[in-house]
Amino acid sequence: MELLTSYTLPELRKRFEELGFETYRANQVLRWLYKRFEDDFQRMTDLPKEHRQAFGERFGVRALELLQKVPAEDSTKYVFKTRDGHLVETVLIRERDHLTLCVSSQIGCAVGCKFCATAKDGLLRNLTPAEIVDQYLQVQRNTPQRIRNLVFMGMGEPLANYEAVRKAVEIFVSPWGIELSKRRVSISTSGLIAQLRRMAQDPLMRELNLAVSINAPDQSLREALMPISKTNSLQDLLQVLVDFPYPSDRRIMLEYVLIKGVNDSKAQAQELSRLIAPHRRKFKVNLIPYNPDPALPYERPSLERVYAFQEVLRSHGVSTFVRLSKGVEVFGACGQLRSKRALVVK
Ligand code: SAH
Ligand code: SF4
């Protein structure tokens, strides 16, 4: 069955025309879907009965099946199943004054970062635009308050699934779609240079928040932790980011996962500062204390060590904040999302 969420408004208008329906019906249907989160054609009351019937027979609304909701203190993990039987995880995070949804863009991930649980499965497949958008729609239907912030920080490398992520973003930010502010949608990437260049040329994508996972202050450690760095070197990556046409009142976020005894020393903080300080108006640093995983040998440093690291960056004038991950207890925190584990929980 065709899924409604596979189409942008112009595409759906064209599709309706092909099928012999009036094109404005596409505007009506998407209004129900994206403004009122309605998923049943029978309740789209401004459509004639025959249209409701015909659309219902031809189009599906849900790309995913919700299997499980795992609540924790300040986050809830949603486990979905795709039509071909894969598991997808999405995390709703309650921040002080708003909700943030962390969506997945792939099942597994091919980038292979040594410290990341998602990498353990390798890449099983890309998610489709409909599967990305449906994560939002289903969680929003479950949530009384509007979800206004979205981050591509779940399973997968969003820029390795560029076309699908781009189309989902179009649905997330367009006036006819979910209409989130571009400033409230973030893409987190391990730093695929060719794709960052593509993003820089793309008016839709370059206005989103950009977060880049740095994780090491030098090439050799970065290569050891993130094999992708062999072909996407730290130096080239920084150059692409320095050249990135980013709004001058905003800063690109560099993410740095602090792992005990691996990349958390003061000397490494000095080295990172030397790298970033010359561009301190372009970047801010987000320090993420590592979330341990039973399948991986790494540990989280003490908070004291985290703050000492932060202090070094601050003393070089680099704007830095610490993110204490929410959802650790439900395996819903960064780098802990893993489709195969969800099977065990179930
Ligand atoms: N693939 C993208 C987005 C998903 S990972 C990327 O790598 O940026 C989102 C963030 O979680 C990245 O900054 C990654 O470095 C971090 N991360 C991965 N595993 C983690 C773990 N176990 N604890 C804390 N952060 C982790
Ligand atoms: Fe993939 Fe990101 Fe995990 Fe690296 S940290 S393996 S890029 S999901």
Image (tube, rainbow, N blue to C red):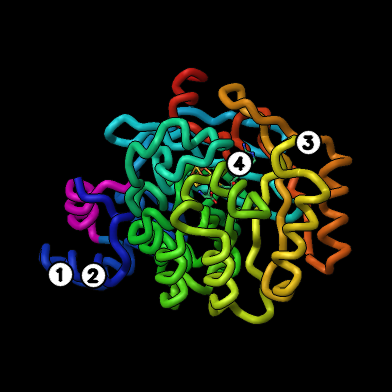
The residue carrying mark 4 has its beta carbon less than 8 Å from ligand 1: yes
Residue 153 vs 299, above or below: the answer is below
Nearest to N terminus: mark 3 or mark 1: 1
Q: Is residue 125 left or right of residue 276?
A: left
Q: Residue at left 32%, top 48%? A: 61
Q: Residue at left 69%, top 54%? A: 98
Do residues under tags 2 and 1 come within 8 Å of each other at their CB atoms? yes
Residue pointed to by mark 4: 334
Nearest to N terminus: mark 2 or mark 3: 2
Helix, strand or loop under label 2: helix
Residue pointed to by mark 2: 13
Q: Residues within 10 Å of mark 1 (few under 14, many from 20)?
A: some
The alpha-carbon separation of the residues under discs 4 and 1 comes to: 43 Å
Q: Nearer the viewer, residue 67 or 332?
A: 332
The alpha-carbon separation of the residues under discs 2 and 4 comes to: 38 Å
Q: Quadrant of residue 48?
A: bottom left
Q: Is residue 84 left or right of residue 267?
A: left
Badge nearest the viewer, 4 or 3? 3
Helix, strand or loop under label 1: helix
Residues in magenta, as a range: 48-61
Does the magenta portion include 55? yes
